């Protein structure tokens, strides 16, 4: 039981990391304008 719970937690953390830092493939698909606006929001 404990091992399964640990795996679930690891999957959750991995999902959060992917949401925070999307792979290069996703960022390349996203238009440049949208990326610029996102960068402005993050820096602001």
Image: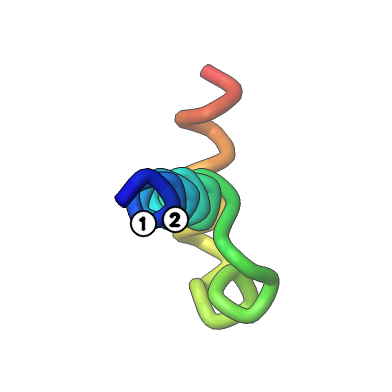
Quick one: 29 or 5, which is closer to the camera? 5
Quick one: 1 or 21, which is closer to the camera? 1
Q: Secondary structure at mark 1?
A: helix
Location of residue 43 in the rendering, given as x and y in whole percent from the top left corner = 59, 23
Q: Residue drawn 51% across and 53% down? A: 14
Q: Quadrant of residue 4?
A: bottom left
Quick one: 41 or 20, which is closer to the camera? 20
Q: Residue drawn 44% across and 46% down? A: 6
Q: Quadrant of residue 34?
A: bottom left
Q: Most extreme residue toward the front, as rendered?
A: 1
Location of residue 20 in the rendering, given as x and y in whole percent from the top left corner = 51, 44
Q: Nearer the viewer, mark 2 or mark 1?
A: 1
Q: Residue drawn 63% across and 80% down? A: 25
Confirm or deny contact between disc 2 and disc 1 (CB under 8 A). Answer: yes
Q: CA distance from mark 2 to mark 1?
A: 5 Å
Where 28 sits versus 38, above or below?
A: below
Q: Secondary structure at mark 2?
A: helix
Q: Estimate how packed mark 1 is, as few (under 14), some (14 to 19) or many (20 or more) residues with alpha carbons within 10 Å.
A: few
Q: Is residue 42 visible?
A: yes
Instruction: Judge from the rendering whether residue 24 lies leftward or rightward of residue 5; answer left or right.
Output: right
Where 19 sits versus 42, above or below?
A: below
Q: Which residue is mark 1?
A: 4
Instruction: Judge from the rendering whether residue 20 lies leftward or rightward of residue 43; answer left or right.
Output: left
Q: Which residue is mark 2?
A: 7
Q: Is residue 19 visible?
A: no
């Amino acid at each position: 039981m404990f091992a399964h719970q640990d795996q679930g937690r690891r999957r959750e953390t991995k999902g959060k990391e992917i949401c925070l830092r999307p792979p290069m493939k996703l960022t390349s698909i996203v238009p440049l304008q949208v990326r610029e606006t996102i960068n402005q929001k993050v820096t602001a």
